[in-house]
Amino acid sequence: MFNLATIYDIAKEAKVSTTTVSRALNNHSSVNHKTRKKIIELAEKHGYQPNSKAKSLATKKSWSLGVLLIDDSDSGLNHTLFANIINSISKTASKRGYELTFLSKNLARSTVSYLEHANYRGFDGVIVANTNINDPHVNELIKNVKFIACIDQNHSNAICVNYKNRDGMEMTLNHLFSKGYRNVIYIHGQLDNYVTQERLIGFKETAKELNIERKCKYIEGEYTSPQKAYDITRRIIKEGLPDAIVYSDDYCASGGLRCLREHGINVPKDVAIMGYDGVEISSLITPSLTTIYQDTDRIGEVVTENLINSIENNRSHGYIIELPVSLILGETT
Amino acid sequence: MVTIYDIANKLKLSTATVSRALNGHDDVKTSTKNRILETAKEMGYLPNSMARSLTTKKSWNIGLLFSDDQNSGFKHIFFANVINEIIDSAAKRGYDVSIISGNIGMRKTSYLEHARYRMLDGIIIATIDTRQEDVQNLIKSDLPVALIDQNFSESICVNSKNIKGIKSLVNHLYDKGYRKITYITGQLDNYVSKDRKKAFLDITKSLNISNLCSTVEGVFTDSKLAYELTKDIMSKENRPEAIMYPDDTAAIGGLKYLLENGYSIPNDVAICGYDGVEISQLVTPRLTTIKQDIHKLGSSVTYLLIDEIEGKKPSRKTWVDVELLVGETT
């Protein structure tokens, strides 16, 4: 049983206005202590349970955050990196009293836009992760939602919390160069992805500085697709091995490593390889991966705290925060 | 739910005007129409066709309740994969998924209060200590609830065939000639661990190898602990011929210890994981493991809950099959 009483019933019994009751239950400073106490007692006595919809229309605060993780293929939690980030977002939100709701293009029996969906739920704010912001629905969402944060994206209306992707590739290439590797093949992620674009800029600029531009080759792969990495690696083996192969992430590097192994190629003796992310598997496989570590706990914390602070201070302008990455030395280089 | 009346009220216009604007009629002045559309969007108004399928008693929102010892549910690969399926399946039927924590706006609430507050249509419970009073109250309430890998007769339960999984693994090891098997189980206060341990004891008994086999309590997905336990096990006089791990991640931790210390797999010792997640097939040697049907687990628990929410009477107990994946470690 719930909603046995409403604010009207309590107001009547306490002989105050509904505004006063509402303020008392929301801990508003304008209600005097004695009155507040009386109202709270009455509320408890009547089993008053404010329901979130009514409450949010009155106070416009829902204590909930929308998370856009779903793209057309899946919700992204199959990707370890994002699962870890969501974990951190979830813990941080919970500590501050907020709850996460995953947002999709479906509501009831209709297809709605993300924006309509977000407005219907009355989220206090939205976090966009792992989606293509070139999708017009995602773009519409970012442009129109007041408090919105993105991870590894670039949009002027949003709080963007990004890893230093260019630095990551600079570290990668500098490390390989320092180990004597010159011919490098970079199997990067999908080109329509902001992160890929940033990393390619970092890689190419560093290659130029080190004077090895002409010794570097680029192949478009796919994030977290070990099978695709395996196939591309097989092609590379046929066409001739470089000094080093850089994969778009650790899962892909594992797929590539498997392919090299099966062809009797020794890593790092015959060819060096590197991954990216620094997720658990990178240190568990043998040989352990040299990779770039992205702190998922930190990014989840930072994006959530910043979004919540904006909401609670009513500051809706966008800005960018960049988080450092670091090199993890493994056995593959 | 925002209606045309709310919009008309806010803008001090007639409901007729608002209605005409929202339906795209030309006889509304452009500037007025734009104001109306803007306001409608801001207030979260959904057009009639959608509103018809929305009732005030239904929120099209499902709660997901989970936790574990380290409070990091999403970090466990198998689990994250299942949640992925839950979210996708719910979206296909038009439902959102919200994570329940028992914290709303800094007020501690019970899970049931939290669900009521959010007007959730139902809850999926996974990997949480169901002996907690809070969880018990939720299960016993009139709110539709569905559980994964648990055993409550009053609620919808979707279970993976844990017993079959363990028996398949042990039979496979036995067929390959292994007799001395050590099983590192998951935490024993967990329903799944208990079921699997019992299955292990039963099958080794029926194969007449009980006296050669043993169990050790480990922790799910804890690769570091598995590493240490493996070190322990291999340093003893009476080494096993095969080690079974609670899951693939733990198995890979154990594998790391063995490879670093020069053991040949499977010649010196065979190992097995459980779950059949992607990394189990990416390591060298490839893990022999039990593949759980993650897609079916996630989608079944979600669809059955939704059926219950929508007034159909779904079955209370559903079993999801498992598959032995023979790799290179046995």
Image (spheres, rainbow, N blue to C red):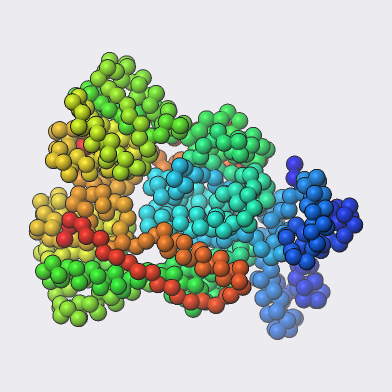
Classify B311 as above or below A35. above
**Is B292 situated above or below B169?**
below
Instruction: Name the residue located 45 percent from the left edge and 33 percent from the top edge.
Output: B190
The answer to which image quadrant residue B311 occupies is: top right
Depth check: A275 or B107 in front? B107
Who is closer to the viewer here, A70 or B80? B80
Q: Residue at x 37, y 54 (%)?
A: A80
Residue extending farthest front: A33
The C terminus of chain A is located in which quarter?
Answer: bottom left
Q: Residue at x 57, y 61 (%)?
A: A65
Q: How many marks?
A: 0
Q: Is A286 left, or right, of A112 in this rendering?
A: left
Quarter of the N terminus of chain A within the rendering: top right
Residue A124: percent from the left, percent from the top?
Answer: 61, 65
- Residue A34 falls in image quadrant: bottom right
* Viewer can see residue A327: yes
Residue name at image x 54 percent, y 55 percent? A95
Q: Nearer the viewer, residue B277 or A235?
A: B277
Q: Quadrant of residue B274?
A: top left
Residue A88 place in picture, x, y as percent: 46, 56
Name the spot of residue A64 as percent of width and height, x first.
60, 59
Confirm whether residue A225 shows in the render.
Answer: no
Q: Is residue A7 left or right of B122 when viewed as pictured?
A: right
Q: Residue A202: horizontal and vertical position, in percent? A: 28, 75
